[in-house]
Image (spheres, helix red, strand yellow):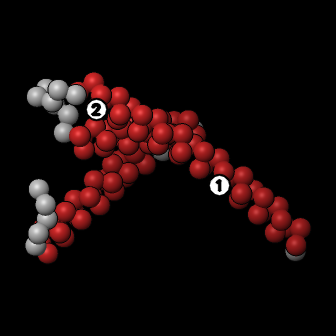
Amino acid sequence: MTTKTTAEKIGYGGEKIAEMFIPAGLTQKASQGTGLIGRALITGAGAGVIKLAQTGVGPERKDVINDTLNAVKTGATAAAFSAGTELALSGISKFLKSAGSKIQ
């Protein structure tokens, strides 16, 4: 379906935003108290589920296996980026704290 009217465009935009924020909130709650790997795995699982839902996977689709493999790849990529970003930001934070204390 192509959006034509302003109302359709607003609805489409709202749906896309909700598609990301609702799962993000759920994964954040689910990952509380877990370590880096747990948070990365939960984030990856959430991304994979979103990807699978976006493909419209179901028994009537002929490419179920390919759709599922693509969702797994998306989840693995999201997990890797999640862990890598958290490690990088942690290192940057430690460096800045150390540099700041030396300046003072």
Question: Circle 2 is placed at which residue position?
Answer: 67
Q: Residue 90: in sight, yes or no?
A: yes
Left or right: where 102 falls relative to 41: right
Question: Residue flagged by tag 1: what amino acid is it?
Answer: Leu
Quadrant in which the C terminus is drawn: bottom right
Q: Residues within 10 Å of mark 2 (few under 14, many from 20)?
A: many
- Picture coordinates of residue 95, whole percent (x, y): 78, 58
Q: Is residue 57 above or below residue 22?
A: above
Question: Residue flagged by tag 2: what amino acid is it?
Answer: Asp
Left or right: where 59 falls relative to 91: left
- Picture coordinates of residue 19, whole percent (x, y): 28, 53
Left or right: where 49 falls relative to 10: right
Q: Residue 42: in sight, yes or no?
A: no
Question: Circle 1 is placed at which residue position?
Answer: 89
Left or right: where 91 falls relative to 98: left
The answer for how far apart the CA atoms under marks 2 and 1 are is: 33 Å
Looking at the rendered structure, which numbered label has been put on residue 37?
none
Q: Earlier in the sequence, mark 2 or mark 1?
A: 2
Q: How many marks?
A: 2
